[in-house]
Structure formats: structure tokens, C-alpha cells
Amino acid sequence: MPVKNFALDARLTPPVLRARLAAGPDGRQRLLAPGVGMFRSAPDPGALVGPDQAIGALEILGVVHHVLAPAGAGGLVIAPAEAPRGPVAARRPVGFDDLLLTLDPSATRGDSAAQQTGATAGATVSGAVVLRAPTSGRFYVRSGPGKPAFISVGAVIEVGQTVGLIEVMKTFSRVLYGGDALPPRARVVRICQTDESDVAQGDPLLEVEDAASDQNTKPHPA
């Protein structure tokens, strides 16, 4: 697929919506759809959600919106009986005030510290660190069909290097390697997304490990 436009800054600002909060008689919180569209990229059951945290993406008339948890929301995502069958994160149509997520406020940080790793950039179990998507959209590992991938497992990359593309409304932006929690020179341990995957802001793209000692290894070309 040809790339129509490369924006050097991968930090886009897609529109943002805030889910509606409703309290249930069981003490659980219901996060409701703020509009009509296709909802995707919800956190998995057991993930910890707090105010202003991204809880998925809502596509309305072809425009992808970030959906944030409202003020007062907090708890672990559970799989409620009234939710549609299938994975919570599956792409599905929703109407205004349809259920997006159910949270259990009684099960918070103290009950599941391990679940917090998905919400922040940090170390994985293997000791690698994660580069996360700067925005929601469709992730590409190559510039077009038949083109070589920007990176591969085992490649050494440096700050400012292109590791993929994200498409939002047919505009393609480079995803550049770098971040406060990431080493300036790193080796790719795992590519977390396949080509043309739909991702939400904060989804893992790459796992990398420090390669500062590999001074004789040339970085993978951008």
C-alpha cells in the first residue's frame, strides 16, 4: 500500500472522547459508550483502569477516537455476564450508552500489582522494555507491499530511528524509536504487532533490551 504522507512527528492528536460512568447495584462501575461506532482495543480482563486512562478506540464514521476512562473510574476490568460473548477487546458495534467495560473498584492496585505493567512503559518479565504506540491507528512494519521491514528481531536500533508507520485517516506517520524509559541504543527482542494490526494508544509495539555494549554492531537502517 503506497505511503501518501510521512509526518516526521509520530505524536498525532486524534480526537478524544470520555466514557460515561454508571454505578451498578452490585457496587461495580459500568463504563458506557459516549457515541455510536465500532469499539476496539479494550483492556483485557484483570487489567487495572483509572481516571483518564485510555480504554480503547471508537471509530465513528471512519474517524478513530481515543476513549478515556472518566473521573471517578477505577478498578480491575472484569468480564460481565451482560457483555457480548467473545474477547473483551474484540472490535464490535456499540450504540450510545452501550456497555464498554465493567470495573470492580474493590480490586485495585493492592490486589493486582502485576496487572499494572500493561499501562506503563517498563520492564517485562524477561527484563526487556517496551516501546508503545504513540496513538491509535493501523500499524505497519514496512512502507509498502514487498518492501523490507523497518526492523527485525535482533536488529540494533537507536533514538530517532523509524520502526514502523501508523495510519490515521489515510495519513501515515513514522513511529520513531525513543523515550525516557528506553535505552538510547537497543536490540529488538520481539515485534509485538503484525503488519496492518489495529492498535490503541499505549499498546506494545516492540520489546527491546539495552545494547550499549554492542558498539561494534551497526544500527539497522531506518
Image (cartoon, helix red, strand yellow):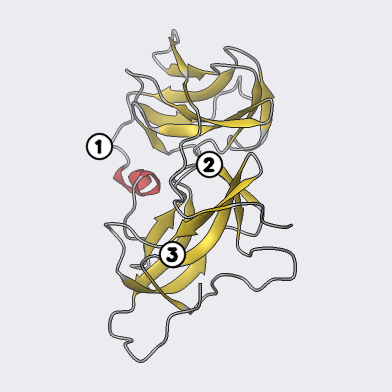
Indicate the secondary structure of the residue bearing disc 1.
loop
Foreground label between 3 and 1: 3
- Comes first in the chain, label 2 or label 3: 2
Hey, which residue is sitting farthest bottom in the picture?
216
Disc 3: CA contacts within 10 A as few (<14), some (14-19) or many (>=20)? many
Mark 3 to mark 1 CA distance (whole Å): 27 Å
Q: Is residue 95 left or right of residue 184?
A: right
Residue 73 is marked as none
Indicate the secondary structure of the residue bearing disc 2.
loop
The x, y position of residue 85, in whole percent, is 68, 30
The residue identified by callout 3 is: 207
The x, y position of residue 192, in whole percent, is 53, 60
- Comes first in the chain, label 1 or label 2: 1
Res 94 → quadrant: top right
Res 29 → quadrant: top left
- The answer to whether residue 134 is visible is yes
Mark 1 to mark 2 CA distance (whole Å): 29 Å
The kind of residue on which mark 1 rests is: Gly
Is residue 168 shown above or below 190?
A: above
The residue identified by callout 1 is: 110
The x, y position of residue 50, in whole percent, is 34, 29
The kind of residue on which mark 3 rests is: Glu
- Comes first in the chain, label 3 or label 1: 1
**The N terminus appears in which quarter of the rendering?**
bottom right
Disc 2: CA contacts within 10 A as few (<14), some (14-19) or many (>=20)? many
The answer to which of 128 and 111 lies nearer the viewer is 128
The answer to which of 39 and 1 lies nearer the viewer is 1
Indicate the secondary structure of the residue bearing disc 3.
strand
The residue identified by callout 2 is: 136
The kind of residue on which mark 2 rests is: Ser
Q: Is residue 175 left or right of residue 49?
A: right
Is residue 71 shown above or below 202?
A: above
